[in-house]
Image: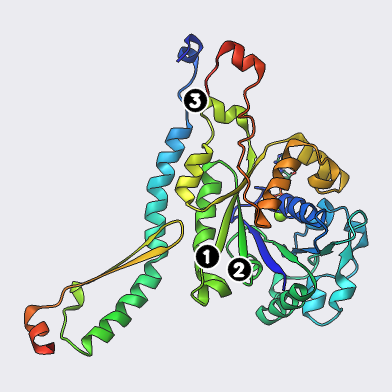
Amino acid sequence: MGKVIVVTSGKGGVGKTTSTAALGAALAQRNERVVVVDFDVGLRNLDLVMGAERRVVYDLINVIQGEAKLSQALIRDKRLETLFLLPASQTRDKNNLTAEGVERVITELKRVFDWVICDSPAGIESGATHAMRHADVAVVVTNPEVSSVRDSDRIIGLLDAKTVKAERGERMEKHLLLTRYDASRAERGDMLKVDDVLEILSIPLLGIIPESMDVLRASNLGSPVTLADARSAPAMAYFDAARRLAGEALPITIPGEKRGIFDKIFGRKAA
Amino acid sequence: MSIFGLFRKQQSAPMARERLQVLLAHERASASTDLVAVLREEILAVIARHVEIDSDKVHIKIDRDENVSILEIDVEIPLAATAQAA
Ligand SMILES: Nc1ncnc2c1ncn2[C@@H]1O[C@H](COP(=O)(O)OP(=O)(O)O)[C@@H](O)[C@H]1O
Ligand SMILES: [Mg+2]
């Protein structure tokens, strides 16, 4: 049985879709069978970030409404054999997502894939709760910034209340993925520190993804950053996060912490 | 602080951290009120089946931590009621 991951945050624009694609491609490069599922009905974007926008025929709503078979809606990645996308509908209303329908689709996917990664829409409404409902593990995407941290706190509360796991009285596994981290702003003391966010949200850290042009370049090309430029800083951070998801214990490195020679000579200290 | 630091604006991150801590303590308390209210009613009903208690003397609180949430139940039972139950 595969593992179901929800990538969630409350706030929009923090990097959920980027992270879903990057983690999915990273896991698939380990030869594991991965499906990324877009739950952002009406505002789908995962297809674009994955570069599969012109290949969408059927979507999640079609499958839920019985208008297409799951196998007809799944799109196989052109670069990675074991990576698949289940797109969201762009035209249908999100009210077409039913609890039974979502459960049926997730159950079927779990049977076929090692990883089912659900890209949650922003907000705390039905779209977000459908996406998290059957998760085994939650990746809480947060930017080091006040409104994102507050919304993540809210989402953590929902994960502990509205998921099947929580309702069964089991512990919901939650991990913090700190994204768009800017080392120079942190150094200046104008961005929340990693430790601050960890202390406030009190969930374990999955990784820190630096703010980087490489992410924009990858999405322009329609490729997860872990495929477009595997040697770039954000890609390497995503690869590490994927390894931790798969259960490896790796030390966390904070982007930009390695002092450059300039800093050594002038003995600059981090704030 | 270096001499350049004197010209710098004050760091804003410590302020962000403090504001968040205060705000979230408050929001967590009110987000769990529903659950607290339900638990309170039900716990009260169970105890009331065995001993007579004052509903104001039942205090319930939920604290969230990294791995667990801690549910604190504080019930004051009058001496007379304990004697009657024993
Ligand atoms: N690490 C990063 N560095 C730079 N830009 C990023 C990074 N992560 C995400 N972005 C950009 O931020 C925007 C929102 O990202 P997206 O993944 O769509 O967020 P969400 O799905 O949470 O709404 C996109 O333009 C994306 O390219
Ligand atoms: Mg998105």
Residue A119 location, x and y as percent? Answer: 71, 60
Q: Chain of mark 1?
A: A
Q: Secondary structure at mark 1?
A: helix
- Disc 2 element: helix
The local secondary structure at tag 3 comes to loop
Answer with mark 3 or mark 1, whichever residue precedes in sequence: 1
Quadrant location of ligand 1? top right
Determine if marks 3 and 2 fall on one subunit.
yes
Q: In front of the other: label 3 or label 1?
A: 3
The subunit carrying tag 3 is A
Frontmost residue, A67 versus A158: A158
Cβ of mark 2 under 8 A from ligand 2: no
Residue A250 screen position, x and y as percent:
63, 46
Distance between mark 3 and mark 2 Cα atoms: 39 Å
Q: Nearer the viewer, mark 3 or mark 2?
A: 3
- Nearest the viewer among B36 and B78 is B78
Residue A264 lies left or right of residue A230; in this view the side is left
- Look at the image and tell me whether residue A125 can be seen: yes
Q: Which mark is residue A271?
A: 3
> How many numbered discs sit on the rendered protein?
3
Q: Residue furthest front?
A: A249
- Chain at numbered mark 2: A
What residue is at 59 percent from the left and 56 percent from the top?
A: A10
Label 3 to label 1, Cα distance in Å? 35 Å
Question: Would you say the residues marked 2 and 1 are in contact, meaning their CB atoms lie under 8 Å apart?
Answer: yes
Q: Residues within 10 Å of mark 2 (few under 14, many from 20)?
A: many
- Which residue is denoted by mark 1 in the rendering? A158
Q: Earlier in the sequence, mark 3 or mark 2?
A: 2
The disc label shown at residue A129, or none: 2
